[in-house]
Amino acid sequence: MRNLSREDRQGVWIWVAVGAVVALVVGAYAYVKATRVRTDSASCVLADGSNRVLAPLAQTVFLIDQSEAFTQNQQNIILQRIHTDLFDSLNAGDRVMVFTFSKNSYFDLVPVFSQCVPPKDVNPLIGSRSRVKYFLEAKFDRPLLKAVNAGFQEIGDESPILEAIQDVGRSNYIDKRPGSSVRLIVVSDMLQHRAGKYTHYGHRPDFAAFRDSAYGRSVQANLSGWNVAVYYVARFGNGKADQGIEHMKFWQQYFLTSGAKLASWEPVI
């Protein structure tokens, strides 16, 4: 290089610099491609560039009772909980489903919403935080809230809660393979009412008597290993309906007998 002119030496260094930049870009691209976490849109399984599965499937399932209308304040509380507390706890690759039920529809339920949580993290090399945020809100957050909000529509004068829980427990839409997990969130006043069969109106619920009855045996669910949360919607002015401690104990025992853990019982007033 000593025999080169000054201009030639400058040209060589420019090409060296260009080559280094190209090598850096190619290396960065290869690294991002190899380590990029993606979500399979069908199975919600997280995997890296080598197709190595990174996490088991986690599922959050909403079951919304449409037997009686929710007040506007109750709707706001539920939507706010989902938008803040719940959304923050979801991880990319989790599947979220929304089922609704009423007196006309409580078996062979089909989810009105079923979607994987998109990636929430931004790659520092090529990612755009604003773009990721927009995608999350447009493709997941808003459609989820819309589906839940539609579930607030009132349909009917009976509340087949036990039947709906049993149906969701055996639903083929929910992955029950080893390694998967299910969090069931029931949005309801939990006041079971099937005319001529069983009701929580007019008397305190007795789980032991219910469990040993033919009807109790017929609606027992299998929720083995599930975690259950209840958004316990308060009812006012319904006279004979008791939403006291005995009512909560009934459902604690029911979920325990079903193999589930009642993780939280959150009043919605």
Image: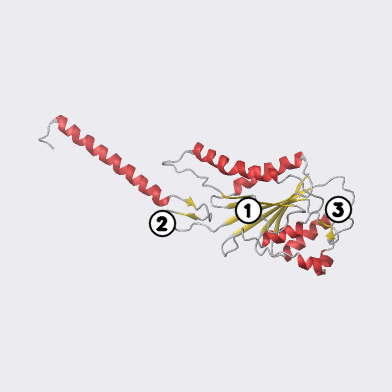
Q: Disc 3 and disc 2: Cα gap in Å?
A: 56 Å
Which picture quadrant has residue 222? bottom right
The mark found on residue 60 in the picture is 1
Which amino acid type corresponds to the residue marked 2 in the rendered image?
Ser
Tag 1 near tag 2, CB within 8 Å = no
- In the displayed structure image, the side of residue 189 where residue 134 appears, left or right: left
Local crowd at mark 1 within 10 Å, few (<14), some, or many (≥20)?
many
Q: Residue at x 41, y 56 (%)?
A: 50
Which picture quadrant has residue 139? top right
From the top left corner, tell me how far across and down residue 199 is, in percent: 84, 58
From the top left corner, tell me how far across and down residue 124 is, in percent: 44, 42
Nearest to N terminus: mark 3 or mark 2 = 2
Q: Disc 3 and disc 1: Cα gap in Å?
A: 29 Å
Local crowd at mark 3 within 10 Å, few (<14), some, or many (≥20)?
some
Q: Is residue 2 above or below residue 248?
A: above
Which element type, helix, strand or loop, lies under badge 3? loop
From the top left corner, tell me how far across and down residue 9 is, in percent: 17, 34
Residue on which the image places disc 3:
242
Residue situated in front as seen by the camera: 164 or 31 = 164
The mark found on residue 50 in the picture is 2
Q: Quadrant of the N terminus?
A: top left
Q: Is residue 133 above or below residue 68?
A: above
Residue situated in front as seen by the camera: 125 or 113 = 113
Which element type, helix, strand or loop, lies under badge 1? strand
